[in-house]
Image: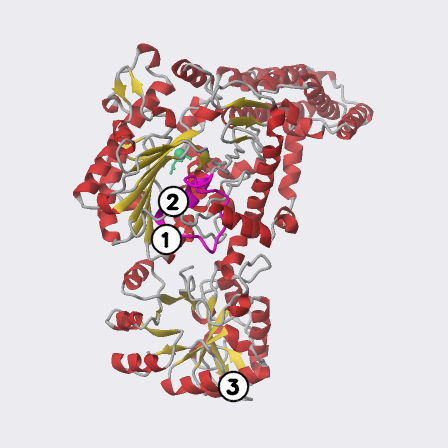
Amino acid sequence: MLFAILLTLKTALFIYLTRVEYNHILIFTVSLLYILFFFTLIYLSKNKKKHTLAFTFYNIISAIMFADAMYYYYFNALPSIAMVKQLKVVGAIGDSVKDIISPLNILFLIDIPFLMIYSKWKKKMARERKIYPKKWRVGIPSAILAIIVIFNIVLNSFGYSEILGKQELFTYHGKDIIEQFKSQEEMASGESMLDKEDIEYLRKRSTTENGKHTGIGKGKNLIVLQVEALQNFVVNMKYDGQEITPNINKFINNNSSIYFDRYYQLVGKGSTSDAEFVTNNSLYPSMEDPTYEQFGDNTFYGLPKILKDEGYRSWSFHGYKPEFWSRDKVHPKQGFERFISEKDYKVGETVGFGLRDEDFFEQTIPYLKEMGEPFHAFIITLTSHTPFNMPEKYHEIDLRPEHVDTMFGNYLQAIHYTDKALGQFFENLKKEGLYDNTVIAMYGDHFALSSLDDENKEVMTDYLGYEYDFDDMMNIPLVVHVPGEDIKETVSTVGSQMDFLPTILNIMGIKNEKGIMFGVDMLNSTEGIVAQQIHMWKGSFFDQEKMFVMSRDGIFDHSRAKDLKTKKPIDVNQCRETYEKVISEIDKSNFILRNDIIKDLLEGNDKFSVKDRSDEKNIDIENKEYIALSGGEVKGIPSTNSLEALNESYKKGFRLIQVDLQWTTDEKLVLLHDWDETVSQLFFVSPKKYSYEEFKNFKMVEGLHQMTFEDLKKWMDEHSAAHIVLNIQEDTVKALRTIRETYPGIQENIIPEISDMQDYYPANAVDNYRNIILNISSKDYSDKEVIDFIKTYKHFGIAMSLDRARGELPKKLEDEEVPTYVYTIDDKREKTEIIKNNVFGIYTNRLEP
Ligand code: GP9
Ligand code: MN
């Protein structure tokens, strides 16, 4: 009984702390019913440990309420059970978590020690009185359950189903758990969500043809600076006469900068990492998990890859652990050739949780010089991270007594420090001669001071002179400096990190012809909308005039809206159309993430393809610089040529897969490296040639499966985006002819790798294999012979050993526009070295595209 009463009180507290605004009684009643249901179920059972059980239940619910309320305070939403996966991140930001535990929150847990004593006593009493019922009396709990079910049915029929699902403790978590069991396919469905026209519309919307400032940065280097927790309100701010960000202000107020003063953050649960994702890809972040975690393996075509296609080299920089937010995996996948992280820097003094900004910037300069031009550097700062506690010696702002030890005061100190580091960085760039040929774009990743925090809200409202709300909280600055341009300007078009990519591409004079962007170019379009989904509910938005805040209970009429200029409330009905539009845009973007659509677009192998594949006669070799060697490595074993190796390579993103063909004694073709060592190692048989049947009956190590050419053909039909590089050591021409005759048209997806120049003509002219790689490793052709030969015959590429590739030949080939492929590279350092030497592609077991 005591447990039930206390839990009821806690329910009331929970409703208060999770800021339920409407239908309190209804929500309270349903929670109460659940509590009664569980307690009666426990107490009326014949279980002998019922007090322990009841107490356990009580503790679990208390703990959930505690965690929920804490999460709610920060995110304005209840957490999903899936968040348990993210606990390691919470560990790293532990300092900030401590800051959001409020005294009221402690009430959820404070009674538990006392109750422990009580329940011990209670158990003793029960034992002495022996009051166990003989039968499990399920009547009462069943009746309560029936009431709950009826309640739900009635509410559903009145269209109120979301009220409980979004706010009531048991309903919310119940639904959330069921959600977790939905398969990925189920979530990914919704085929009709995006069609060709959508793609064309989006492409048109995000591209500027010769508009304002188009191409003013063309050919220049690009530095993108993502500054931790840089909010817009500190920019140009004077605090008791002291400039908080003097260097940023200088950077804004010169002749060559464009300042976007109504720019907003657009992140999800991945916070900083989502800011990176959205900025580079112009897609909505996931709301389930950090986007890097959930969709990090997808294929994207964002800024680093677009620039790479323009001849840029892209590296990223961040002075913290490489694996945090999975950057070590995702940055390379996003197209950053190198990710320079904490382990590449000398870490001196750490402030907050990583390298000090000043050290970080200073040590970044040599890397920039190493990159060569044109370069693209994505630099992510860290020191001004919440809760902004820096050692006294870094405090340079004279704070009023009332701001000392407040988050506001600490933030001013921290951002002032970062500003100083930025100033030094700009000076160093000038000194190194990098400033004048580099476009620098700088923005904040997300807010520093949450308007949901009472103290922040009060201090900020006082400072601003009007209510501190989401519109100021999420407003971050964006500044783009284009050296040599006379463009000083403040652009007040509303936009967000989503709009960064189209905007910067316009400035750099580059078009994104392969991918898809949901943002717009803020210099040439006012069509943009800022659609928030975290802190504010999905459907909320900022547009040119207003802010719309969707109600958390899902009922449109309960939402609020205000005029961004006057800050006065306006009628929400003016927002309905845009509200519907943002939901549909978000859903489309989610559909792209779930179905990995960018990959399909890049490969042109899908129904969403805008380009017609039939006129792509020759294979587009861009993005295909990796060749999986002998099928690629599987289970740590190289050169198996097995079905599993092919599948694995394909899954990793390889679209060029090399396989070795051998003739059997009865003159059939099978996938095998050789009849000597390999056949004995893979199948434990003596080294000699076997028949087709014998080969098929072998058992491969580790339960892998060998393939005949026939199997390969089937596999190719199912993987039409893959191209098979065929290495046939014996009777190459005969094999190629047999294959072509057996499977007409197969040449489209086959790249013969020949080692004798004499094989070229028959393969190409007679059997119509259009893409041929000449492998010069076994025949010792001189550079001149090779160059003369490719001048006569167009090649897909020339393959050579690492040693040969270190010499002059790759450069000479590049002048003839024939790519060099080198093998075998399994090591990142070797890869970096060799790519610099004009090598276009590599054969590899282990590296991934
Ligand atoms: C950590 C840094 C901080 O590497 O990016 O992330 P945040 O906690 O701000 O998301
Ligand atoms: Mn951050």
Which residue is the extreme one toward the left? 431
Judged by its main secondary structure, the magenta piece is loop
Q: CA distance from mark 2 to mark 3?
A: 51 Å
Residue 756 visible in rendering: yes
Q: Cβ–Cβ below 8 Å for labels 1 and 3?
A: no
Of label 2 and label 3, which has the lower sequence position? 2
Name above or below for residue 253 compared with residue 115.
below
Q: Give the label on residue 701, or none.
A: none
Q: Residues within 10 Å of mark 3 (few under 14, many from 20)?
A: some
Q: Which residue is mark 2?
A: 504
In the picture provided, is 559 more to the left or to the right than 102? right
Q: Magenta segment: does it hold 744?
A: no
Q: Is residue 725 above or below residue 164?
A: below
- Find the distance from the CA under tag 2 to the CA under tag 1: 11 Å
Dot 2, crowdedness within 10 Å: few (<14), some or many (≥20)?
A: many
Under mark 2, the amino acid is Ile
Dividing the image into four equal quarters, which quarter contains ligand 1? top left
Q: Determine if the magenta segment contains residue 503.
A: yes
Give the structural element (helix, strand or loop) at label 3: helix
Residue under the point 53% across and 88% down: 665
Residue bearing the label numbered 3: 737
Give the magenta part as a residue range: 498-525
Secondary element under disc 2, as helix, strand or loop, is helix
State the image coordinates of residue 120 (x, y, percent, origin top left): 61, 18
> Quadrant where the N terminus lies?
top right
Q: Which-is-in-front pick, marks 1 and 3? A: 1
Q: Residue beneath label 1, please?
A: 307
- Select label 2 or label 1 by which is in front: 2
